[in-house]
Structure formats: C-alpha cells, structure tokens
Image (cartoon, rainbow, N blue to C red):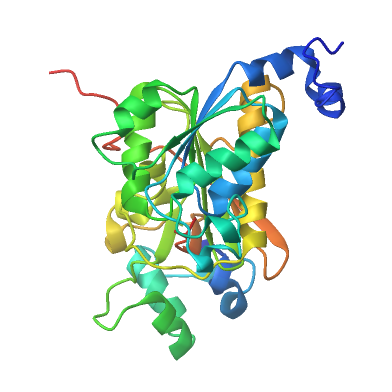
Amino acid sequence: MLIRLKPFGRFRAPLGEEMDVDLPVGSSVSDLLLRLSSLSSDLHAQIFDAGGEVREDVNVMVNGRHFLSLGGTSTPLEEGDEVALFPAVVGG
Amino acid sequence: MDDRGDGGRYDRQIRLIGPEGQKRLARSTALVIGAGGLGSAVSTYLAVAGIGRMIVVDGDVVEESNLNRQILHQTLDIGRPKAVSAAETIRELNPQVEAEAVVDYADEDNLEGLVARADLAVDALDDFYARHLLNKAAIDAEIPLFHGAISGFDGQVTTVIPHKTPCLRCIFPHPPKRETSPAIGSTCGVIGSIQATEVIKYLVGGGGLLEGRLLIWDGSRGRSDEISIRRNPLCQDCGQRREI
Ligand SMILES: [Zn+2]
C-alpha cells in the first residue's frame, strides 16, 4: 500500500518534498519511521533517540492528527494516508 | 473622516479595513503572553494598527542576548522587566493604545483572570507547558488564541477558535521539552507579523483565517507550506464534555 509522506523543516533535505512510501498492508507508524530511518544513519538519529524511542522533538501527523493522540507508534496506516513529518518548533 | 485629531494616522489602512474596522480595532483588548521575539513583532504591529488596549505579560527581565530579536527593548532597557519595557515602547509607538504591563509569568493562578479581560490571546511564549495552560484558559473563556513558535529559520503559526478549530493540544498533545532554541529576529518578524495579521483579520472580519491549518515557515529555503490539522474528539482541553 502507498503512504503519502510530506516532510518539512530539517526532514526536507534528506527526504525531499513529498514521496510515496510503499509499505506492506497492516503497517504502522513505527514501520514507516523504521523504513525512513533505514535510509541513512543520520536520518535514524534525527528520528529515534539512543533508546530507540521516537525523539520528543519529532512530530508525526497522520491525516491531520498527531500520532501521540492516536495510537502512538502502533497507529495503523492505510492506503492513501497522508503523513506529515516535521520537527517541533518551541521558541518564541 | 478623521474625528480623532490624530492627523490621519490610520488613513492608509482605513482604505483596507474601513472606518468600522478601525473602530473595532480601537474597541478591542489583546492579551499578549510573552514579550520576547514573537511578542515584540506582534505587539509592534498591533500597536501601530491602533488596537485599543494591550495587556503584555512577562516575568522576565531584558538581557543583552535578547536584543538580536526582541525589538520592543533597547540597550538601555537591559535589567528592566520586559513587560514594563514593552508597554513603554507600545505607548511611544502609538499613544492612543492603552498598554498594561503584567510583570509575572503566565500560570495556572493568573491566566483565568487575564483571559477574562481580553477579546483574544496571542501566544508569544517559548515553551509548550505554558502554551498548554494558555490554550486551556483561552478555550474556557471562549476567546481565540493566535499561536506562533520559532526555532532558527523555522517557524509555525495557526489560529485556534475554541470548539471550532483544533486547539493547541489537539495538534500537539504532549509538551516537548523546554529548550533554548536558536533564534534570529527576522524569523520572529515573519511569524509575529502573520500572527498580527490573523488578529487584525479576526477583529475586522473578512479574509480567511488559519483555521484548521498549521502554516510551516522554512526560512532557510524561503518556503512556506501548510498541514491540514483536525480536532481530537477526546482532547482534554477542547473535547466534548461527556454527559453523566
Ligand atoms: Zn483540543
């Protein structure tokens, strides 16, 4: 199944503007992030912390909802889902 | 046309928003939480646009390292409370604006009273813990919240209309760790100016607000994009109350 990925901020340089990611049916947010992080060690370090958890400063939105308000990394993905990946911006 | 004896201060913008729009601005009170980089840009443009009253809340004092971006404060203000320095600058920019300084950090105890005195709240904070408190207070008082945040050349901005659009906690359910972000004044200028534009449009009507849309600014590439955002029906701040 194809997932539409839209990277922003620091994820633009390694991933480009927009891409389709082909994942097996039944994949989750975790599977998507692992697939992306397998592209380079730098990307892995930008997505996961040393303990293998998704970094606190990474936002993942599935069809307009933050993954932490859905099922976290086990949130199931479906064909055609739109996933935005962007860094947390907190300063003022 | 000009019945305020102000020499046509607002002449050029009345062409845009009309005399009625100008009166609406003059009748409105904006609560600006944070007198840092974003607070400086938002407050400057709301002040010169002729908003009636501004309440500026910040418990911090001006430091030299603030001066690359916090344009409400000048070298001579180092060591002074930011809220006081901000209110002074606002009055100097436009003596028709009533500016009130609250030298305190926004928290659980004071936010309810602050939002009750305002028509709208501007998020010019620098951490998400306080942002979530402000979000809850604005929703409970049913006033709009104009969110902005920056880090380096990056920024984001959206407008929260209680019980209509996603709130800040719908979008970002867990506060990320507090951190000292890299900051450059021009990014604060971009994001703060968009926030001020949203406030003005909200007050005078017309145009389309950033409702249900998170605008992402990537200054390093000169690009802006937006992410459609949706409400969380179980949001602890704006979700429907369950009848028992
Ligand atoms: Zn909400």
User: Would you place residue B138 above or below residue B170 in this image?
Assistant: above
For the question of whether residue B131 can be seen, the reply is yes
Image coords of residue B225 (percent x, y): 65, 55
The image position of residue B104, as x and y in percent, is 34, 43
Q: Nearer the viewer, residue B164 or B191?
A: B191
Residue A72 in the image, given as x and y percentages of width and height: 29, 58
How many callouts does the rendering have? 0
Residue B238 or B68: which is nearer the viewer? Answer: B68
Q: Is residue B85 left or right of residue B201?
A: left
Name the residue: 41% across, 83% down: A44
Q: Is residue B239 visible?
A: no
Q: Nearer the viewer, residue B239 or A73?
A: B239
Q: In which image quadrant can residue B205 be found?
A: top right
Horizontal arrangement in the rendering, residue B126 relative to residue B149 (left or right): left
Extreme residue in the bottom direction: A41
Position of B126 with respect to B71 (left or right) is left
Q: Is residue B153 above or below residue B198?
A: below
Height in image: B51 above or below A78? above
In front of the other: B60 or B121: B60
Residue drawn at the location 61% of the way across and 32% of the way down: B199
Task: State the image coordinates of residue A50 (x, y, percent, origin top left).
Answer: 28, 84
Please name the residue shown 39% across and 53% down the image.
B60
Which residue is most to the front? B76
Q: Residue at x 40, y 83 (%)?
A: A45
